Amino acid sequence: MIDAIDRKILNIIQEDFPVEEEPFRRIGELVGIGEDEALDRVVRLKESGIIRRMGAVFDPKKLGYVSTLCAARVPDEKVPDFVEVVNACKGVTHNYRRAHEYNIWFTVIASSREEIDSFLREVGEKTGVTDILNMPATRVFKINAAFKV
């Protein structure tokens, strides 16, 4: 169970994480507890699975990168190997199984379209799965994925 202080901490780390030398000291100040307790609470929330991951979200285009959404038609018996190969790429940011003809969907960020094309060819060669759709965005829509707790 989470209490009111945990809820405040979750809201802070989602929308306004303090980028400073001692961020947990600042979080503690904002919710009325000490730095050690603030960090302990975040660790507990992470260990319990309430916090899945903490990290920055960057705009790849502004950093000179390109990204694409991919969908692959993967036979059930090849899914574990396919997912392992895809997830080994450091540029893969999401990978989901879907109840659809194209059952594995993932996003890839790379320094060029050519690098993405090369990665997808390599995935096909390693897994035998070649029916992979490469769908670069033509318009970007971003929503605020923060959840008020």
Image: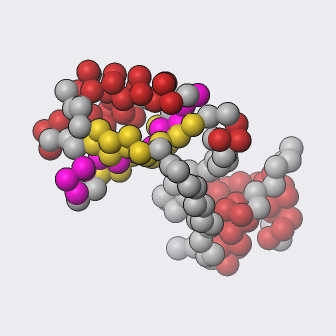
Image quarter (top left, top right, bottom left or bottom right) of the C terminus = bottom right
Q: Position of residue 43 (x, y in %)?
A: 61, 53
Viewer can see residue 43: yes
Q: Position of residue 11 (x, y in %)?
A: 68, 69
The quarter of the displayed image where residue 75 is located: top left
**Residue drawn 47% across the image and 38% down it:** 108
Q: Find the magenta span and give its range.
A: 100-111
Q: Position of residue 82 (x, y in %)?
A: 27, 34
Verify whether residue 101 appears in magenta. Answer: yes
**Residue drawn 71% across the image and 72% down it:** 8
Could you say which is closer to the camera, residue 100 or residue 22?
100
Could you say which is closer to the camera, residue 33 or residue 109?
109
**Residue drawn 62% across the image and 34% down it:** 65
The quarter of the displayed image where residue 29 is located: bottom right
| Left or right position of 30 against 66 | right
Q: Position of residue 93 (x, y in %)?
A: 49, 42
The quarter of the displayed image where residue 120 is located: top left
